[in-house]
Amino acid sequence: MKIATWNVNSVLARLPLVLQWLELAKPDVLCLQETKCVDEKFPAAAFAEAGYLSETFGQPTYNGVAILSRYAMTDVQRGMPDDEEGAQRRLLAATVGGVRVVNVYIPNGQAVGTDKYIFKLKWMLRLRKFFNAHYSISEKVLLCGDFNVAPEERDVHDPRLWEGRILFSKRERAALEEIKGWGFTDAFRLHTEAGGQFSWWDYRQGAFRRNTGMRIDHIWVSGSLAAECNASWIDKEPRGWERPSDHTPVVAEFG
């Protein structure tokens, strides 16, 4: 099974690119973040024509997550159980082929010390508690999405420049490590030790051309899935296409 994650920065704006990538890469499951559209306007028909079922949890203008799958999805869950009414739509989970896929769009946080930063840290704490309450490390569980945190210095083009800033502050990295401590392994790091491998590049200052990016999109797996993960990589090609997302797909293969 091939599972991928991609922050598409508006599924409607990026639909031709997503369809093109599905045709080229042929993942079994693709988790999308920042879909930025209500469920009623999600282009499910276009994806169905391409051979993919859709489950969505969207809202207008901001946030939104979706899962595309070649196979039936069961036990679909939208949001965390303790979400308040009207909460931001950032989590979508489904079981595909015996794997529990949890797709998240962790808040950006805006800037260190702001209310949005505190919201991000609290959301990440809630996510760890969600796994504690609902899953066992003996299960095949996959957590993926735009985590909006670079875990280590090798995941940032210039660690000294980013130290203490949003996406790389100590509290964010500690919160991410807390989630990982549930029992997750970083699928990408099972196969690649080198730094300089990024999944996001700013639109400004020729960041993609200069490779001044960050690795903030991740696929994490429980132990039984880690044992079956035979490859994981970042597919940079779509970031170079016309009118791209500022993120690019991350892929993991199992079996």
Image: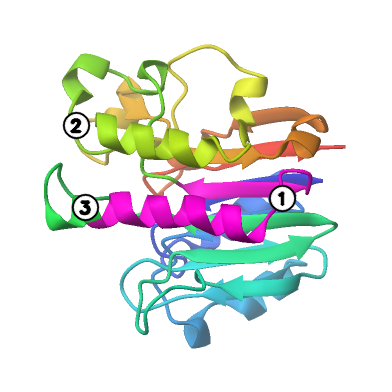
Tell me if label 1 and label 3 are in contact, CB under 8 Å: no
- The vertical placement of 83 against 1, above or below, is below
| Residue 100 horizontal side relative to residue 247, left or right | right
Q: Nearer the viewer, residue 62 or 41?
A: 62
- The vertical placement of 108 against 14, above or below, is above
| Residue 4 horizontal side relative to residue 38, left or right | right
User: SS class of the residue under badge 2?
Assistant: loop
**Disc 1 to disc 3, C-alpha distance:** 28 Å
Image: magenta residue range: 119-146
Q: Amino acid at mark 3?
A: Ile
Q: Is residue 72 magenta?
A: no
- The vertical placement of 196 against 106, above or below, is above
Residue 228 in which image quadrant:
top right
Residue at image position (40%, 51%) is 125
Q: Nearer the viewer, residue 244 or 220?
A: 220
Q: Amino acid at mark 1?
A: Ser
Closer to the chain start, of discs 1 and 2, is 1
Q: Which mark is residue 205?
A: 2
Residue at image position (24%, 50%) is 109
Q: Which residue is mark 1?
A: 136
User: SS class of the residue under badge 1?
Assistant: loop
- The vertical placement of 171 against 61, above or below, is above
Closest to the camera, between mark 2 and mark 3, is 3
- The x, y position of residue 122, in whole percent, is 32, 55
